[in-house]
Image (cartoon, rainbow, N blue to C red):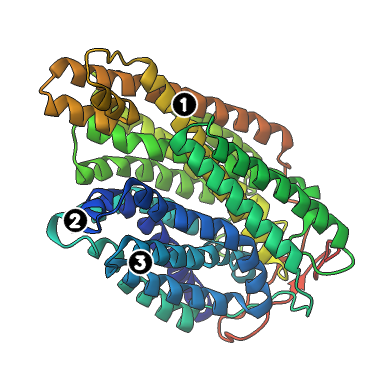
């Protein structure tokens, strides 16, 4: 491996670290909520806004961040985002009021809105078509590793240090990522037109924020909540207007997003399938930690330890998929086998996920840890096969000039899919859970607490020393979890069918394939080559 190649792969490690620190932040917050409620005298509304402030700013800023990266430089924007994220993490750690923490969480969301798309946008620029599957696997792996590692790290920090440590741990990781990005990552630019699509930025930000808020509120207060429905409808209407506006200005000005990308089956279905993965997997990540803690009785550390089984399967799937997608040669001889296209990998990956989720749906309250660990390993294997391959197909449609805005579009759709997944699948689980409860013997307040969540039910059962109530609550939750996993399995199976039908057999040269940026010349601007090079698609 040449020095230039080595620098490129070390730069990828910096990108992965940037993504990992964002993933860790998402999971450690949930562990700290009980402590925050006591230390900051936070109300239930405050606790909800600790999470919502981050999600709303993230949704609103994703698409503008992608365009900004194309205009001012992706490396430069990533550095700014990392500084913002590190500073906001420190601000979270030393917050003394709920308002301060909410404001700091909003700034965290702003940093994450640039980190996510920029980490994907540089992949088509830095890596060749043959190298890209491995690079995507590394970044996707870092994204998902944060979810089980967060409870492990957060639980240990909360047990041994003050609550601010769960936010402060981000700072050294951010510093290391900053140093690595400065030294190793090449700069790349896209289209630097003088026109800025201000109406498009305003409409996309307002629409995504409104839709996200409505979904969060529906997940908390039910789908019959008038404000939740109104904000979701308003967000959908604004986003429809945004699409109409983008259609109208295409060819007249530089639009915020390239709608022409959706003419590519690879981009359309690659993006859709990665969104479906987010929908299903975030439902699992929402429910399974509760199962380990409230049904099986493990603490946060023990729950996170068992969640690593999902990552173990995912790593095996990613390594296998990457090897199958990459044709290698030895000593100048042609490769013995052609690389496998994304279509069979994504199809098989989703099929494996569907089978694993179906097995998980057979869980009973008496089932042991072995069943959960086994089906999660299989689900992770399917995820590792499907996700990077589908992402690679979508990225293959992006030109070097618009990889920032295109990656932001992919990220925005995945983020919306994850939010919908938590809201919809959380509602499915809670409704099925409540349907199995019989609480006529309890006071109204205690009954409401039991109905609110399995954690509340377990707390009431232990406070009243009622073994029967504890068994009822745990049995009801497992029933709800099984119903939710059936829904996830159906989504995965439908995704396998869609991949088989609609994904192209081979990636088409829909947009330019960027030549990797010269690592030895960090300020060099990459030049697209091949058919359709340049800022094509009418932008």
Q: Residues within 10 Å of mark 2 (few under 14, many from 20)?
A: some
Residue indicated by mark 3: 100
Q: Position of residue 165 (x, y in %)?
A: 23, 64
Please, is residue 345 above or below residue 413 in the view? Answer: above
Please indicate, yes or no, whether residue 127 appears anywhere in the rendered image: no
Sequence-earlier tag: 1 or 3:
3
Q: Is residue 399 left or right of residue 104?
A: right
Residue pushed farthest right? Answer: 252
Residue indicated by mark 2: 158
Q: Residues within 10 Å of mark 1 (few under 14, many from 20)?
A: some
Q: Residue at x 46, y 43 (%)?
A: 317
Q: Quadrant of the C terminus?
A: bottom right
Of 164 and 355, the residue lying toward us: 164
Residue indicated by mark 1: 428
**Disc 3 versus disc 2: distance between alpha carbons?**
20 Å
Of 97 and 536, the residue lying toward us: 97
Sequence-earlier tag: 1 or 2:
2
Q: Residue at x 26, y 34 (%)?
A: 292
Closer to viewer: mark 3 or mark 2: 3
**Disc 1 versus disc 2: distance between alpha carbons?**
31 Å
Q: Position of residue 273 (x, y in %)?
A: 62, 41
Please indicate, yes or no, whether residue 407 appears anywhere in the rendered image: yes
Q: Residue at x 21, y 28 (%)?
A: 458
Closer to viewer: mark 1 or mark 3: 3
Q: Position of residue 35 (x, y in %)?
A: 22, 52
Q: Quadrant of residue 400?
A: bottom right
**Disc 1 versus disc 3: distance between alpha carbons?**
34 Å
């Amino acid at each position: 491996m040449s020095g230039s190649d080595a620098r490129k792969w070390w730069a990828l490690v910096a990108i992965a670290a940037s993504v990992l620190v964002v993933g860790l932040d998402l999971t450690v917050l949930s562990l700290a909520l009980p402590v925050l409620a006591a230390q900051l005298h936070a109300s239930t509304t405050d606790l909800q806004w600790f999470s919502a402030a981050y999600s709303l700013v993230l949704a609103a800023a994703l698409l503008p961040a992608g365009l900004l990266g194309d205009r001012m430089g992706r490396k430069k924007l990533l550095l700014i985002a990392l500084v913002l994220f590190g500073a906001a993490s420190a601000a979270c750690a030393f917050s003394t009021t709920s308002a301060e923490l909410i404001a700091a969480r909003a700034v965290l969301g702003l940093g994450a809105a640039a980190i996510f798309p920029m980490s994907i946008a540089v992949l088509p620029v830095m890596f060749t078509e043959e190298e890209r599957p491995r690079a995507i696997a590394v970044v996707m792996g870092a994204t998902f590793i944060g979810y089980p590692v967060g409870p492990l790290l957060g639980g240990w920090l909360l047990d041994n240090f003050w609550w601010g440590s769960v936010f402060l741990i981000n700072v050294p990781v951010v510093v290391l990522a900053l140093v690595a990005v400065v030294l190793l990552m090449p700069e790349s630019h896209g289209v630097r037109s003088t026109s800025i699509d201000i109406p498009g930025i305003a409409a996309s930000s307002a629409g995504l924020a409104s839709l996200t808020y409505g979904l969060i509120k529906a997940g908390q207060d039910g789908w019959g909540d008038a404000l939740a429905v109104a904000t979701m409808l308003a967000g959908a209407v604004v986003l429809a207007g945004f699409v109409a506006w983008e259609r109208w200005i295409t060819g007249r000005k530089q639009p915020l997003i390239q709608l022409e990308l959706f003419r590519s089956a690879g981009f359309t279905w690659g993006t859709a399938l990665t969104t479906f993965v987010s929908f299903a997997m975030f439902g699992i990540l929402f429910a399974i930690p509760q199962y380990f803690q409230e049904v099986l009785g493990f603490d946060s550390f023990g729950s996170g330890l068992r969640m690593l089984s999902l990552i173990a399967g995912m790593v095996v799937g990613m390594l296998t998929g990457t090897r199958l997608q990459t044709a290698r040669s030895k000593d100048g001889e042609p490769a013995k086998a052609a690389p496998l296209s994304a279509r069979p990998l994504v199809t098989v990956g989703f099929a494996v996920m569907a089978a694993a989720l179906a097995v998980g749906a057979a869980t009973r309250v008496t089932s042991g840890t072995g069943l959960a660990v086994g089906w999660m390993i299989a689900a992770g294997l399917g995820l590792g096969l499907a996700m990077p391959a589908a992402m690679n197909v979508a990225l293959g449609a992006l030109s070097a000039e618009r990889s920032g805005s295109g990656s932001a579009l992919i990220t925005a759709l995945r983020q919306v899919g994850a939010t919908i997944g938590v809201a919809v699948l959380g509602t499915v689980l809670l409704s099925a859970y409540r349907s199995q409860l019989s609480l006529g013997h309890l006071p109204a307040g205690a009954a409401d607490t039991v109905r609110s969540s399995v954690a509340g039910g377990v707390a009431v059962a232990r406070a009243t020393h009622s073994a029967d109530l504890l068994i009822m609550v745990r049995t009801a939750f497992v029933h709800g979890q099984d119903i939710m996993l059936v829904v996830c399995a159906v989504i995965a199976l439908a995704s396998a069918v869609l991949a088989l039908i609609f994904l192209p057999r081979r990636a088409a040269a829909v947009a330019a394939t960027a030549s990797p940026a010269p690592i030895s010349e960090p300020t060099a601007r990459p030049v697209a080559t091949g058919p359709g090079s340049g800022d094509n698609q009418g932008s």
